[in-house]
Amino acid sequence: MAQDRRGQFQAVGQILAQVLAKTPAAQPPRVESESASPATPQSGGRYDFDLAEFPLFSFCKPRLAAKSRDPLVYTDTITGRDGQPVTRTWKVYPGPFGFGGASTQTLLYDLLQLYCEQGARGSQIQFGTLRSLLLRHGERNPSKRDYDRVRRDFNILRGYDFHCTNAFWDHAKHAYVDMNWQLFGAVFYFKPKADTGDGELPFGFLEVSSVLQQIARTRGFFSLGFGRPLFDRLKPLEQRLAVYLAKKFVSQKRHRRFVADLTRALPIEAAAESDVRKALRVTAQGLLENGYPLLSAFRFEKSTDGRWLAVFERKAAPKQDDAVVRRAGEELAPALVTDLNRIVEAVGGDEDRVWWTQCVKRLGPGAVDRALGLLKEAQQTQTIRNPGGLLTRLFQKIADEYGVALN
């Protein structure tokens, strides 16, 4: 039995009959869209400034075994003491599972988005279940191989060891800082039985390193100017270049860089210079063909000393706006994150996560339990083609009873 706004009780079947009579196939309302004007692309996803620029992954299949344990090295110039240019060097060492590839890049993207959705504060990223991570990219029926891949990608990310020389100039201590640090710590999975790996409970979380926490608290994560739908359409090297250019286009209308340097930053692992330029040209063209909103044109130029330059012309700057993060995850409590992950599991998709976050925050755990229970009962008695649409109707009815506005 459930109590309506007048204090009268209704049978569960009566509630379902009322809700199902109201176009259950309606889509959940979207809180955000990627249909913004090209002049002001939406903030969409978020990323760290340094991780957007220095290399982390290998897209060569397979990576040469002789080089598999060598660090990825990245060098740039920062402003040091008294405004003087100083060379900064990043070395990325792999852990026992080696360097990650395309799927590891996707997992890191997802984890950073989740951290922002949860407020980009605290020591944990709560991902719920591995299935919920896979659902973020539309993998409705993941296989054991998919689950094993995600677990391996977690281990790869946890194993990365960053060694940075001249990371920054500390004005308070009047000293240059060298740093050795990692992104993540322990990862926790939860299962219902001790003697089997079958089944998951939605309590999984990953510990965030103190350095990454400090970055989130102080500098924060910048807006990429595009979201997950576009990210998913891109090939792995296109994804990497899209993130890299988003960082550059925050401040530059035209980004010019020697091809050899850009090759190490992405990286592009090809022996011949002509093959490198071909791969870079194909990758940039892929961004343009997929509607990447920040890039208008790409070309090669020869520098005065004969070296090749890659030139990227900005179409629009990624708008730097924290509204999405504030709306999606202001101090979202761990219990509410768990409820959010339960909803994602129930509807079989993650594309409306911001909307479900709003429902969870405004209605609370009791309403979530009730709505999910009603959804499960409906699915047991009839075919529900759009569980997200039905769950939205259920939440709206409960919100009316509570006198709460969801929109």
Image: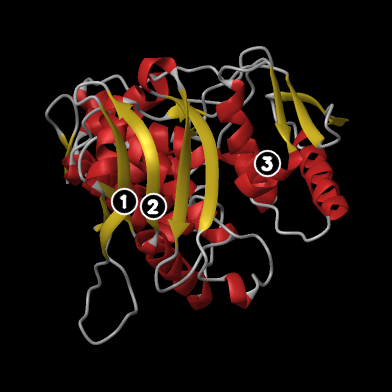
Q: Is residue 248 left or right of residue 82?
A: right
Most foreground residue, 289 or 251 = 251
Most foreground residue, 332 or 392 = 332
Task: Locate residue 341, reporting x and y percent.
Answer: 33, 50
Most foreground residue, 136 or 101 = 101
Task: Locate residue 262, reporting x and y percent.
Answer: 68, 41
Q: Is residue 299 left or right of residue 130?
A: right
Amino acid type indicated by mark 2:
Phe
Looking at this view, name the residue that lies furthest to the left.
Answer: 7
Mark with earlier residue (2, 3): 2
- In the picture of the structure, the residue carrying the numbered disc 1 is 180
- Dot 1, crowdedness within 10 Å: few (<14), some or many (≥20)? some
Pointer 2 with pointer 1, Cβ within 8 A: yes
**Could you give the CA–CA distance between mark 2 and mark 1, rounded to whole angstroms?**
5 Å
Mark with earlier residue (2, 1): 2
- In the picture of the structure, the residue carrying the numbered disc 2 is 162
Mark with earlier residue (1, 3): 1
